[in-house]
Image (cartoon, grey):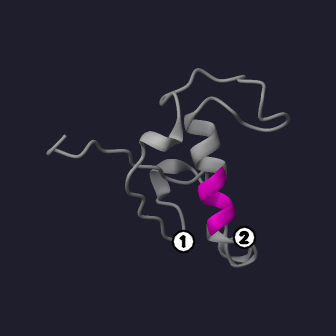
Amino acid sequence: MDGTAISFHDIDNRLKDIMDALQGRAGGSKKLRILTPIIPNDKQVYRVTIEKALPPKQSKGMGHLVITRRKDI
């Protein structure tokens, strides 16, 4: 998203989109899984840090997502 689009989108709605996509649900019906899930259910997620920022150049304007596993699990 460019600077204008970033100002219009609520961060909580973007987080919901991300969590749905991680479970294989993107666009349309939430019952249909059109993507291969990365996680089976978002109830296994214990912590999320999210912030709005302009995407880095290497993402070609598509955004940037980093997923890490906690070391103590």
* Residue at image location 30% in from the left, 44% down from the top: 68
In the picture, the disc for residue 9 is 2
* Residue at image location 69% in from the left, 62% down from the top: 13
Q: Is residue 13 magenta?
A: yes
- Name the image quarter holding the N terminus: bottom right
Q: Say which element carries label 1.
A: loop
Q: Is residue 9 above or below residue 66?
A: below
* Residue at image location 71% in from the left, 24% down from the top: 33
> What is the quadrant of residue 20 in the picture?
top right
Q: Position of residue 4 (x, y in %)?
A: 73, 76
Q: Nearer the viewer, residue 21 or 46?
A: 46
Q: Position of residue 11 (x, y in %)?
A: 62, 69
Q: Say which element carries label 2.
A: loop
- Name the image quarter holding the C terminus: top left
The answer to whether marks 1 and 2 mark residues whose Cβ atoms lie closer than 8 Å is yes
CA distance separating discs 1 and 2: 9 Å
State which region is magenta: 12-16
Say few, some or many: other residues with alpha carbon within 10 Å of mark 2 (under 14 / 14 to 19 / 20 or more): few
List the single residue furthest toward the front.
43
Q: Main secondary structure of the magenta part?
A: helix
In the picture, the disc for residue 28 is none
Amino acid type at mark 2: His
Whether residue 63 sits left or right of residue 66 in the image: it is right
Q: Which residue is mark 1?
A: 52
Amino acid type at mark 1: Lys
